[in-house]
Image (tube, grey):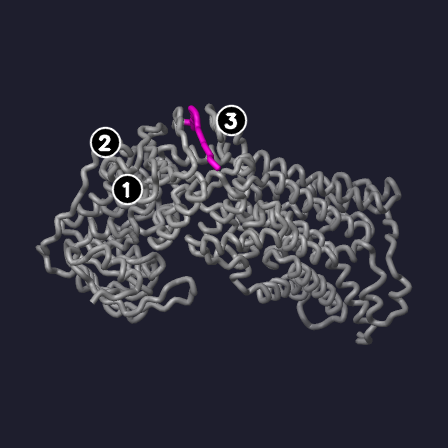
Amino acid sequence: MSFDLNFIGILIGAIMASSVPLILAASGELITERSGVLNLGVEGMMIIGAISGFALMVITDNLFLAVIGSMLSGLIISIIFGVLTQSLLTNHVATGLALTIFGIGMSAMIGKNFVGIPGKEFPLLFVNLKENVPFLGPILFGHSIILYFAFLLPFLTNYFLKKTKIGLIIRAVGDSPTSASNQGINVTLVRYSCILYGGAMCGLAGAYLSLIYTPQWIENMTGGRGWIALALVVFATWSPIKVLIGALIFGGITILQLHMQAVGLRIPVQLLSALPYIMTIIVLVVISRDSRKIKLNTPTSLGQIFYKEK
Amino acid sequence: MNTKLRVSEISKIYPGCVANDEISLEFGSGKIYALLGENGAGKSTLVKILSGVVRPDKGEVFLNDKSIKLNSPLDAKKNNIGMVFQHFNLFETLSVFENLSIDSDKKNEELRLSVSNILKKYNFKIDLDIPVLNLSAGQKQKVEIIRCLIRSPKVLIMDEPTSVLTEQETEDLFVSLRKFSDEGILIIYITHKLKEVLSLCDEVAVMRKGKVVSVSKTKEEKIETLANKMVGENLNTIKKKINNFKYSEEILKISNLNFKSEDPYETDLINLNFSIKKGECLGIAGISGNGQSELFQILSGEIITEYTSIKFRDKEISKLNPRERREYLMAFSPEDRISQAAVPELKIYENVALNNFKSSNFFEKGLVNEKKIKEHSKKILSNFSVNTDNVEMKSQFLSGGNLQKLIIGRELITSPELLVCFNPTWGLDVGAINYIHETLININEQGKSSILISTDNDELLRLSDRICVIYKGKLSKIMDVNEVTPEKLGILMGGGSID
């Protein structure tokens, strides 16, 4: 194993790429949860996004349409969740779980005809710079536009929640829907919007997997990333920046332990495979120890059904 | 500028209950109006209608002789009707300023300016940039009031505003309300506290069972006349016979009680020593937050402290948990009925079962003996006049008064030697308060003892044989009730000394 700078650069680039779906899905879910809605359907929405994106790419041969389509499909199946939990007042947890099961089954059904079809090459930006700038090249350049967007997203989300009026309203609804409603805020509308946004982001995360990261359709290809994204949101105590850190650690250790397995260290493979989960939780718990901050960031009404007095 | 608000034949019917029955009332600016009634009389429904939260089934609201539609809280705001709810409508995790800006159309700088003008004008002291959860109840209420004032309201409705305030905060609130009234804001003040009506309001409308039963000038009313109108029957004022100390036996003796908390929001207790005799009631007064809840939890065994000696009839019980202490025939009625004393989602008989003793045989071989628990619960319901006999009902559907009767009944049905209660009549109406007070006096007369930790001085003076004051975790000396006056209590509660 060589430790030259370029190799480390390439490694970091790979880590960044592997954390993109987590960042996208977790950032979307974070907004949903900040409005007080707990949507456990992340995995389901991601995989629907993955198959829709891939199918559209195959059918239309247009990557742009595929990406937009994957976001729309994530959004559409999140409408099911929205109608059930917000209009029919079903339990968030049960509905979210059902959505995941539905998504996995549905995607497998649609995907039957798309197994084995090769993907299309996704355009990468600044490929020249990637090869010509040592060390920093592979880190900063030669990625898809979605990766750049994903790395910007936590900062945008943070700004949106903290500095904009709509962000304030979302936090208020998550804190106390009853108070918000008494202040004349349309709680149902706010929560619907946040659910749809979360759905779209999960759809995009799925598309990143099937169009860019491993450009093909494999059944169940999200492989639990949706659940990791959900856990990241909680362990990052609903802070977008900490979600980014958590996703990078998870991606980083996933890649590193693969290298360690390849090198043949005398550590049981099972332990190495478990390492990303353990380390991510430890690090996030350590950086999120301030109980006062946790209290301020936690959406108090998370998972609670809201119904308006008439 | 004159404002006239008139409600005409307002009715609102909930399943099984007529909350408002053809209510017609008229208000004019420059005066403070009281809307008086027991819990469940329909006051809150009426103000929810006025603030657009609830829609009436029938009836109209007129503002300055113009009929207005109040279909949502926004409509109330548009018509300059401001409302301060009993349960604050604030966002705890947001900062004060964020709370204020959420429904304001103004730019941040503009809003900050107008808020700081309001703060200056009414001499409110609130840091705008800390989260609301760090504020005291009185400060939270001020934030609510400021939120209304930003919109220069014509009408300001206050729903039971003093239920969470200390006496000083109440005084401050009244000063502010009089100022608002002088400035031409019409104030409607909802309460079940008679004293407040007399000291603050100009006119009073009394509601009972969804109807307005009387409208009059407060000058023409007295506490007794208002109380009778409110309850609808003649209340006999209960007075305790001062205990002549028939017994000298000490039931409970506490020595060297020290408690140091790691939680910055709790109060440390410093070297408390006191004892309770058989058949007496020891009152512990104080402004809330001076160590009462810590003391209660130590007495009940929820907190175990080191180096403290608690002797119950000469047996050391300081290391026993609440259940073990109950076996010694101690009983406890915590302050918060909903979260500490009862589980609102559980049925009445299930809540009764939670208090199980070894001796009560509610559980046999790990199974619940439902029949036995239900019989026992029925006995409690009838002995303590809870207004239902349905033990299958969820506890959350009981009114505060009935829930408290259930809790006290659950504790007392085993005839304990000592009852420790903490604000037992907090938020209850006159009828229920009277009942609880009678019950507490009764147990003393039967030779049982009680410790009454309360923030209500009238209650303490009425029920206690001896009184002391807790201030910043320290106890004052213990005085016989006939040498105590409300003034003396006031001084001690503020940290002063009276000798």
Circle 3 marks a residue in which chain?
B
Q: Amino acid at mark 3?
A: Ser
Task: Say whether residue B305 is visible.
Answer: no
Q: Earlier in the sequence, mark 2 or mark 3?
A: 3
Circle 1 marks a residue in which chain?
B
Q: Amino acid at mark 1?
A: Lys
Label 1: which residue? B405
Q: Earlier in the sequence, mark 1 or mark 2?
A: 2
**Is residue B6 found inside the magenta-colored segment of the image?**
yes
Percent across and percent down for residue B248 are 10, 60
Q: Nearer the viewer, residue A82 or B127?
A: B127
**Is residue A96 found inside the magenta-colored segment of the image?**
no
Percent across and percent down for residue B82 are 49, 41
Label 3: which residue? B67
Q: Nearer the viewer, mark 1 or mark 3?
A: 3
Label 2: which residue? B233
Percent across and percent down for residue B201 are 34, 41
In which quadrant is the N terminus of chain A drawn? bottom right
Q: Nearer the viewer, mark 2 or mark 3?
A: 3
Q: CA distance from mark 1 to mark 3?
A: 44 Å
In the image, farthest residue toward the bottom: A3
Q: Work out whether disc 1 and disc 3 sit on a shared chain.
A: yes
